[in-house]
Image (spheres, rainbow, N blue to C red):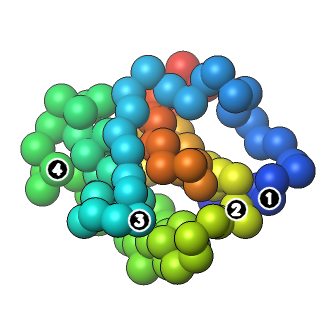
Amino acid sequence: MAEMTDQTNTVAFSEDSIGPHTAAWDRESEETPVFAVVSAVAAASDADPLELPPLGDAIDPDALNQLFMTRSDSTVAKITFQYAGYDVTVRGNGEVGVRSAQQA
């Protein structure tokens, strides 16, 4: 289940614990939040991105991109969800972090 916060709320991850594996996304490039999530999880699991389960099994990829990419300044601070055995945090500032769900 995904967990979303606005700029004033907190979630399970502290500010310094985005995760040991990170990626970035950018509104001005093709590096979307979905691309960054898949890239970070692939790096963390040492797997080819095409070998990962469909992201759609964990979260709606179109909604994830739209949530962060449609405004110049997202009102969503971050969203967290589980994907392929990892806790994933996507932040409105362009950071994606993943950590093993077993380490959380």
| Residue appearing at x 54%, y 20% in the figure | 103
Q: Amino acid at mark 3?
A: Arg
Report the label total: 4
In the drawing, what numbered circle is on residue 6? 1
Cβ–Cβ under 8 Å for marks 3 and 2:
no
Q: Amino acid at mark 4?
A: Pro
Q: Earlier in the sequence, mark 3 or mark 4?
A: 3
Q: Earlier in the sequence, mark 3 or mark 2?
A: 3
Up the image or down, 11 lies above or below 101; here it is below
| Residue appearing at x 81%, y 53% in the figure | 7
Disc 3 to disc 2, how far (Cα)?
Answer: 14 Å
Q: Nearer the viewer, residue 73 or 50?
A: 73
**Identity of the residue furthest to the right in this view:** 8
Give the image location of residue 73, x and y in percent: 63, 65
Q: Element type at marker 1?
A: strand
State whether residue 63 appears in this view.
Answer: no
Cβ–Cβ under 8 Å for marks 4 and 2:
no
